[in-house]
Amino acid sequence: MTQIFFLRYISLLIFGITLSFSFAGINFSKRNILLEFSVLLLSTVLQVLGFLLFGEDFVWKAYPFLAHLPIALLLFFFYKKRISTILASISSAYLCCQPAKWTELFYLEFFENETFSDYLYIASLGLCWILFIKTVTPYSSKIYNKNDKSVFIFGVIPMIYYLYDYSMAIYTDLLHNNVRVVIEFLPLLFCFVYFTFCLVYYREYEQKTEAVHKEQIIRIVSEQGAKEIETIKNKEKEAKFLRHDMRHFFRNLRLCLSEGNVEEALEMISAFSEKIESTAVLRFCGNSTVNYVISSFAEKFREKNIRFRYSIKLDDIDVDEISFSSIISNALENAYNAQLELPEEKRQVELMLCSMDEKILLSIKNPYLTEPVFSDGVPVSTKEGHGFGTQSIIYLTESLGGNCQFSAAEKNFIIRVVI
């Protein structure tokens, strides 16, 4: 085994492992890189042992078990990824090798220097790696972390190609002939068509998601606006009655004081003050859209006996108020649903919203009954129809140029957003 062959082999392993992780939505943190290196080391050792004990032909045929299986096990047990996500991620990374292979084959059609073709192959892998990491995996990873139906729809081509290549070219000789360019043309075509389709689809998906978010928040604003108008009308009626009763109140108060009933007079003042306070329209912040959303959930919390504690110091916002209100709405909706699982005496939601150093800070804290499951710092749900709110928060926060953090400590779930 020559040095260039070993370098080529290691480059291919690094290429496949890192892309598989990226397609699965695993970022390049220090911990994740260390785990990827561990998989690389384990796979290398297994293949070297297989080569020494059984020969090269065994290594090629056992490659899925020596290289791909360790990746799948780590993604499944450590990162809690679904089987569909794992299959799509690994097969997509396998498909991504085609451009480098095509480049080498094209070169060998005109030149016979195989040593240089190895270097060309390694260089092509590096360029392809950068291209896929920058342009493809950020979008494909989002698709591959959706429900199983969506994953299989978009992952069917790389999955089929994976099975096709091993069954026709590695485990059998059905496709082996002298015209290699023809053999490799179909996988190359699949590669470009597939990822072009992914990019086009995701752009349309972004537009659709944004439209859904805006429609959702507009509906909330409209409903809450109607409620607030009705509330204001009721408060005005109550104020008219108070003005009418004020004359009787002062007459009774003067009578109590003249007779020396100070305690009774104080009770009358306290009761009348509460009536006055009840006619005031509750305002949480200066921005009408945000205020509508918070008011709507404050009413929902009151109906379900959920204690609502808040600290809001925000007059107005400089970002898109529809998107920001949708972030608050989704976060409060998640908190609301979590409280319905708890007994009434434990229900509580804490909201902190303020502006500081030209940044908007949002924090929502609530207790929970079911321990949340995190994958790469993001809470995930296996329940059908759940998890959309969290993905919406992440999407909208990133679209506004901010970042969000999810955590759980002392039986409390906390979301923090900085924009």
Image (cartoon, rainbow, N blue to C red):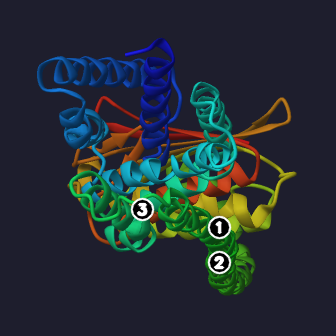
Q: On the rendered image, what quadrant is the C terminus found in?
A: top right
Tag 1: Cα neighbours inside 10 Å, few (<14), some, or many (≥20)?
A: few
Give the x, y percent position of residue 273.
63, 59
- The residue under label 1 is which amino acid type? Thr
Q: Furthest-left residue in view?
A: 53
Of labels 1 and 3, earlier in sequence is 3
Q: Is residue 418 above or below residue 195?
A: above
User: Which dot marks residue 208?
Assistant: 2
Q: Residue at x 46, y 65 (%)?
A: 388
Tag 3: Cα neighbours inside 10 Å, few (<14), some, or many (≥20)?
A: many
User: Which dot marks residue 158?
Assistant: 3
- The residue under label 2 is which amino acid type? Lys
Q: Is residue 154 above or below residue 17?
A: below
Q: Report how far apart the C-alphas of labels 1 and 2 lie in the structure.
A: 19 Å
**Camera-side residue of 113 and 316:** 113
Mark 3, mark 2: which one is toward the viewer? 3
Q: Is residue 5 above or below residue 295?
A: above
At mark 1, the secondary structure is: helix
Q: Residue at x 35, y 41 (%)?
A: 374
**Camera-side residue of 252 and 96:** 96
- The residue under label 3 is which amino acid type? Pro
Q: Is residue 379 above or below residue 247?
A: above
**Camera-side residue of 268 and 63:** 63
Q: On the rendered image, what quadrant is the N terminus found in?
A: top left
Q: Report how far apart the C-alphas of labels 3 and 2 lie in the structure.
A: 26 Å
Give the x, y percent position of residue 257.
63, 54
Give the x, y percent position of residue 270.
57, 55
Mark 1, mark 2: which one is toward the viewer? 1
User: Which dot marks residue 196?
Assistant: 1
Of labels 3 and 2, earlier in sequence is 3
**Camera-side residue of 285 and 39:** 39
